[in-house]
Image (cartoon, rainbow, N blue to C red):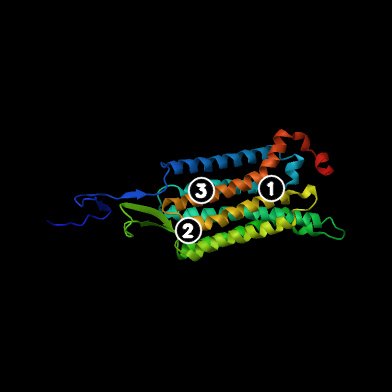
Amino acid sequence: VECSRCPERFWSNSDRTACFPQLVDFLSYSDTMGVILSFISVSGAMFTAGALATFFYHRHTPLVKANNSELSFLLLLSLKLCFLCALVFIGRPKPWTCMLRHTLFGISFVFCISCLLSRTVVVLVAFRATLPGENLMRYFSPAQQRMGISICTLIQVLICVLWLTLAPPRPAERGDREGQGPRVVLECEVGSVVGFSMVLGYIGLLASLCLLLAFLARKLPDNFNEAKFITFSMLIFCAVWISFVPAYVSSPGKYTVAVEIFAILASSFGLLFCLFAPKCFIILLRPERNTKKHMMSK
């Protein structure tokens, strides 16, 4: 004859005769989806480590030297970070994980694309430097390439610092307040939408610039065909992240996080396989093509 409200984090049954705890929903390592995404992430990091070991072991061969071995090592390290940062998105949201997941993601991808951008510029400049009277390569020494990568990455670091200082991402709950049933969805709110947009926008700006320069350099002579692989990899990267936006907005609950992890892994695998699979194939299975004579004949 008397109704009592259920305590906080409890929900009444269909007969309104008892209270039971609300279910807590988030993408965890015990979920099937979490296990699959974790396995793919670790596998990608292992593939990247294998490519890095291959390049390091054969670092004195003509193919590795011709592809700027130092930038290749930096690019592989950044790709490994991109794969591993997906693991931070899995698990119960906490204040430090919410701040780490988006900043690590943003800085890792900017570091990766900055290396690609530097390689693309070097390809263009190296071809133009062969023209009479041109001496442009003196402006693009390895030290200056490292400085350019550092500056591009530092800009993203500053954006992330401002974001974390003014309105950082934080854990949030939804479900009980919106009347969606006996389930509480734990997620990370981005805090400042402007900060999150600036992080993604800066990645998109560098990716678009890299794609444009690689597209312009795609028809250079065959010994400069690195730009073709960069073009393919950036096309995959841009396609994945353009399709990510509507999927991210329309995905409910923990599937929002799964969509973001999938975009990170798909774009990372696209970069890894387009850029390094052909070279590893030649190094390991076609060593007769990894000679200075064969490369110069092209």
- Rendered-image quadrant of the N terminus: bottom left
Q: Nearer the viewer, residue 128 or 278?
A: 278
| Element under disc 3 | helix
Occupied quadrant, residue 138: bottom right
Q: Which mark is residue 70?
A: 1
In space, the residues marked 1 and 3 are separated at their CA atoms by 25 Å
> On screen, 40 above or below 252?
above
Mark 1 touches mark 2? (CB < 8 Å): no
> Nearer the N terminus, badge 2 or badge 3?
3
Please name the residue that numbered disc 3 is placed on. Answer: 86
x, y (%) of residue 264? 54, 50
Q: Residues within 10 Å of mark 1 (few under 14, many from 20)?
A: some
Q: Which mark is residue 249?
A: 2
Q: Nearer the viewer, mark 1 or mark 2?
A: 2
Q: Quadrant of the C terminus?
A: top right
Q: Residue furthest right?
A: 132
Q: Earlier in the sequence, mark 1 or mark 2?
A: 1
